Amino acid sequence: MRLLVLADHDNRSLASTTARVVGAVQSIATEIDILVAGEGVESVAAQAAKLQGVNKVLAADASHYKYQLAEEMAALIVPLMEHYDGLIAAATNNGKNILPRVAALLDVAQVSDAQAIIAADTFERPIYAGNAIEMVQTSDDKLVLTLRPAAFAPVSGGGSAEITKIPAQPAVGISGVTGQELSRSGRPELTAARIVVAGGRGIGSRENFKRLEQFADRLGAAIGASRAAVDAGFISNDFQIGQTGKIIAPDLYIAVGISGAIQHLAGIRDSRIIVAINKDPEAPIFQIADYGLVGDFLKLLPQLETALDKAGLLPPYTRAGRH
Ligand SMILES: Cc1cc2nc3c(=O)[nH]c(=O)nc-3n(C[C@H](O)[C@H](O)[C@H](O)COP(=O)(O)OP(=O)(O)OC[C@H]3O[C@@H](n4cnc5c(N)ncnc54)[C@H](O)[C@@H]3O)c2cc1C
């Protein structure tokens, strides 16, 4: 099966999700090419070429690919699909935006959000906010698939795929970007972090949320939030975890002042160890937590920090020192 993987990047760096997608499809592919489309993407193409198991990197460089808008990207990808049996992307903002348009133009049914590959046409994906797993089989002759990157191991670097520049298609020009606000943080990225500390409505205020951020920084953790915390304005919605937020799979997830609604749990099920801090002993989050601390987080966080310090588990990393 010849597969085209859509690279996830910001015109400078290749996201680690691309290595996971390549890792995921190795069992069903005879040949894997990567498409890097953007503006000034030589360095991204070079990074993609280093991924193990990649045959060729197709690089399309044009100003109208800068923001990877679905309309422009689909016009580029659809003609390429003549040479491929499938198009695969991570189920990230770009993958979720671009692939449905490609699928519609190819007149095939997309398989979305797969977390396991059973065969070249058969996949497992979560439904009902992760409460059930559905097995889907496609009968379309072209596969259009998004994958949950956290469910798959990445391939390593050290490869040396050929890079081929491909011509851009004429600009479609029916959509554009009028402005962009980028959130900058020295903390690890939420979906890739090994440790995530998340706050909910129980944090109570934006000021209290800063206390939680201090705790996260001491652990070298990413910060996350429930939707209620986002809606209350404690933190921006980039940090929302759950069904309508980010799906995470850290080694350690610490939920503070979060009740454990199913829509939130949908985003944290793949965490290896879940710790919950909540003042309500009946909070549903305790049903899935590996460890629970019952009490007011403002009292418990300092105690937890002292205990971790004493156990030598909380070195006083600074954010800059850790990363
Ligand atoms: C279609 C749809 C999609 C949704 N998508 C998402 C999503 O992606 N992500 C998401 O998170 N939610 C989502 N929700 C909302 C979800 O249903 C819940 O409303 C939300 O997760 C609740 O957030 P919370 O746990 O922070 O707040 P609450 O449910 O209000 O819980 C707050 C918790 O804090 C505890 N607490 C209070 N004070 C303290 C204290 N001082 N110390 C310790 N604990 C304290 C309380 O005991 C309580 O358990 C969605 C809902 C719908 C309908």
Image (cartoon, helix red, strand yellow):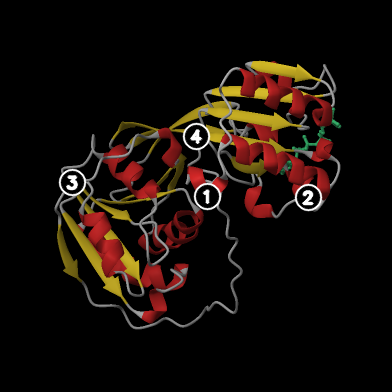
Mark 3 neighbour class, 10 Å CA radius: few under 14, some 14 to 19, many 20 or more = few
**Which marked residue is nearer to the observer: mark 1 or mark 4?**
1
Residue 158's tag is 3
Residue found 75% across the figure and 46% down from its top: 210
Q: CA distance from mark 4 to mark 3?
A: 24 Å
How far, Cα to Cα, is label 1 from label 2?
Answer: 24 Å
Mark 4: amino acid: Arg
Residue type at mark 3: give it.
Gly
Callout count:
4
Report whether the residue tagged 1 is closer than 8 Å to ligand 1. Answer: no
Query: In terms of sequence position, does the residue under pointer 4 or pointer 3 come before the other?
Result: 3
Q: SS at mark 1?
A: helix
Nearer to us of marks 3 and 1 is: 1
Q: Please provide percent x and percent y for residue 32.
A: 21, 49
Q: Nearer the viewer, residue 231 or 156?
A: 156
Q: Amino acid at mark 2?
A: Phe
Residue 131 location (% of width, % of height)? 60, 26
Q: Residue 105 at what x, y percent from top left?
A: 39, 64
Q: Quadrant of residue 275?
A: top right
In the rendered structure, the answer to whether residue 207 lies left or right of residue 270 reads: right
When asked about the image quadrant of residue 106, the answer is bottom left
